[in-house]
């Protein structure tokens, strides 16, 4: 269990990092002619971006005492890099559009300050328990991985669109701070009645294109403002906090394709008249 004090600390941490100022010491390297990991980065770098390269291996990462943000995007890397030299300072870590298949948490150095992890567009089938290695994580992004299962994390915001998940993440431990869960394009067909915790800040749930055929009672999810559902079977009886029964009909049939990638179909549950729509 994540203790209440721990959760409060994580909450403050999330806020502090939003206010963090932008620094100049940014190192960027990109280009398809780059085949080996660069080692000419100034030691006072605050941010490192290495993108769109042909690098297939990160041989080592030096210590950068000021490093806050590290991004390794769109390359041929197949092993999660050893970041132990920068693990104490990192706030944001992006390793996306690579060939990595696992997050080897048991062999990784803990990153006590990391608040955002983005491992989208890799080939990770399972996300292990992240609570020990990323104890301050606020935002977890793992879109488009073919994820089939995931363990828990401390995150309050989940971006998991485009996977093979059949269940919501375990959310009980983070219920106090939970804010949003975006899980469009997964394989969830049923949401058990107790799967959604009564989370005082849980405001957004996106479950479009999952083929869900039932839906839980949402009356205890009192902060929910946005609920996005869509599929061939887009008709649900949704119990909301505000009203007795709302029939959420979110329209695949409204110009399919044109609006499907946007937020246009996200309906406000608290909008007057919501739930009065009929086929
Ligand atoms: C850590 O930094 C040192 C010094 O630059 C380097 O020799 C070593 O290989 C690095 N370790 C890792 C795991 O990257
Ligand atoms: C999550 O990981 C823990 C070990 O950290 C393990 O005991 C537990 O069974 C896992 N749960 C799931 C649902 O995989
Ligand atoms: C809502 O919360 C109340 C009080 O904790 C509980 O008794 C009830 O079973 C919950 N209802 C649902 C549908 O979860």
Image (tube, helix red, strand yellow):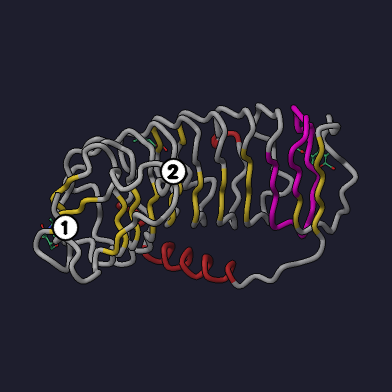
Q: Is 216 included in the stretch rendered in magenta?
A: no
Kind of element beneath mark 1: loop
Residue 160 numbered mark, or none: 2
Kind of element beneath mark 2: loop
Tell me the crowding category of disc 1: few under 14, some 14 to 19, or many 20 or more residues within 10 angstroms, Cα based. few
Instruction: Judge from the rendering whether residue 260 lies leftward or rightward of residue 54; answer left or right.
Output: left
User: What is the number of callouts on the image?
Assistant: 2
Q: Is 64 included in the stretch rendered in magenta?
A: yes
Return the x and y of residue 105 as percentages of the image width and height: 55, 37
Return the x and y of residue 48 as percentages of the image width and height: 76, 50
- Give how far apart the Cα atoms at labels 2 and 1 are: 29 Å
Return the x and y of residue 67 as percentages of the image width and height: 74, 56
Residue, x 22% and y 43% (percent of image)? 234
Instruction: Judge from the rendering whether residue 26 lies leftward or rightward of residue 91; answer left or right.
Output: right
Question: Which residue is nearer to you in this view: 33 or 149?
Answer: 33
**Disc 1 marks which residue?**
277
Residue 82 numbered mark, or none: none
Q: Earlier in the sequence, mark 2 or mark 1?
A: 2
Ligand 3 image-quadrant field: bottom left
Q: Which residue range is magenta in the image? A: 49-73
């Amino acid at each position: 269990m994540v203790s209440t004090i721990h959760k409060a600390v994580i909450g403050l941490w999330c806020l502090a990092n939003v206010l963090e100022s932008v620094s100049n010491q940014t190192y960027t390297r990109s280009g398809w002619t780059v085949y080996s990991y660069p080692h000419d980065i100034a030691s006072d770098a605050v941010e490192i971006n290495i993108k769109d390269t042909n690098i297939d291996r990160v041989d080592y990462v030096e210590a950068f005492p000021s490093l806050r943000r590290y991004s390794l995007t769109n390359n041929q890397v197949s092993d999660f890099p050893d970041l132990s030299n920068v693990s104490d300072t990192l706030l944001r870590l992006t390793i996306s559009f690579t060939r990595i298949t696992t997050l080897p948490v048991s062999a990784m150095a803990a990153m006590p300050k990391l608040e955002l992890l983005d491992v989208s567009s890799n080939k990770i089938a399972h996300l292990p328990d992240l609570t020990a290695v990323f104890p301050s994580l606020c935002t977890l992004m793992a879109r488009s991985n073919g994820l089939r299962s995931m363990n828990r994390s401390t995150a309050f915001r989940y971006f998991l669109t485009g996977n093979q998940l059949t269940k919501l993440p375990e959310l009980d431990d983070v219920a106090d701070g939970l804010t949003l869960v975006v899980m469009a394009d997964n394989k969830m067909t049923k949401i058990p009645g107790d799967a959604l915790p009564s989370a005082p800040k849980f405001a957004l749930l996106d479950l479009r294109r999952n083929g869900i055929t039932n839906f839980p009672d949402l009356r205890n999810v009192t902060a929910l403002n946005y609920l996005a559902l869509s599929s061939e079977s887009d008709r649900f009886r949704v119990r909301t906090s505000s009203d007795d029964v709302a029939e959420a009909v979110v329209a695949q049939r409204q110009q399919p394709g044109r609006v499907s990638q946007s937020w246009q179909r996200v309906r406000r549950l608290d909008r007057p008249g919501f739930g009065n729509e009929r086929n």
